[in-house]
Amino acid sequence: MTDPSKQPCEVHGYHWPKPLVIVKHHLVPLSCGGWSTRDNYVWVCDTGHRSLHYLIGPLFNDDPMPAGGTRRERALAIDAHKRWVAMGKPGNPHGAYGVHGPGAVPGEGVEAS
């Protein structure tokens, strides 16, 4: 397994002078049929992780994506939703994105969906 502390955030790059916590974010959550393969996750800082959940959550609940986020965060959110729709919308998005809003990401600092 790759050491998360040595990964740059795939949204914001390297944080300097103080590195932030880096976590694995699954684009299509495991609970929605996603796999833990390299093409289905990105290494992101805790800020990017929170933003991705904020942007992706409404999409997986068939609501419009909220305003905000960087171009990269919005592109990843749209890509995640397209992948999930192409898979036939399997699983339970409420377990991954539906029960918490911005600022409340379960498992922060560990592998999380």
Image (tube, rainbow, N blue to C red):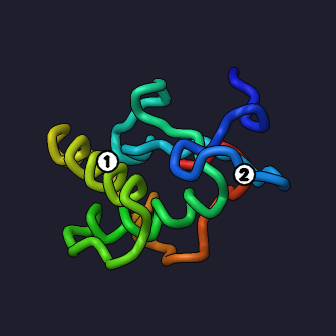
Residue 107, x across and y down, in percent: 68, 56
**Which amino acid does the dot numbered 1 rest on?**
Ala
Q: Position of residue 81 (x, y in %)?
A: 26, 52
Extreme-top residue of the structure: 1
Tally the marks: 2
Question: Position of 13 compared to 79: left or right?
Answer: right
- Mark 1 crowdedness (10 Å alpha carbons): few <14, some 14-19, many ≥20: many
Quadrant of res 4: top right
Disc on the earlier residue, 2 or 1: 2
What residue sits 56% from the left and 58% below the top?
Answer: 48
Decide: is 89 above or below 49: above
Instruction: Tell me which residue sits at (36%, 62%) in the image.
Output: 56
Q: Which mark is residue 20?
A: none
Residue at 60% x, 66% y is 105
Residue matched to label 1: 80
Instruction: Tell me the SS state at disc 1.
Output: helix
User: Are circles 2 and 1 on residues that touch, CB within 8 Å?
Assistant: no
Identify the amino acid type marked 2.
Answer: His
Is 16 placed above or below 41 here?
below
In-image side of 22 versus 84 (left or right) = right
Q: Looking at the image, which is closer to me, 108 or 89?
A: 108
Q: Residue placed at 37% from the left, 44% from the top? A: 28
Q: For numbered disc 2, what is the local secondary structure?
A: loop
Q: Which residue is mark 2?
A: 15
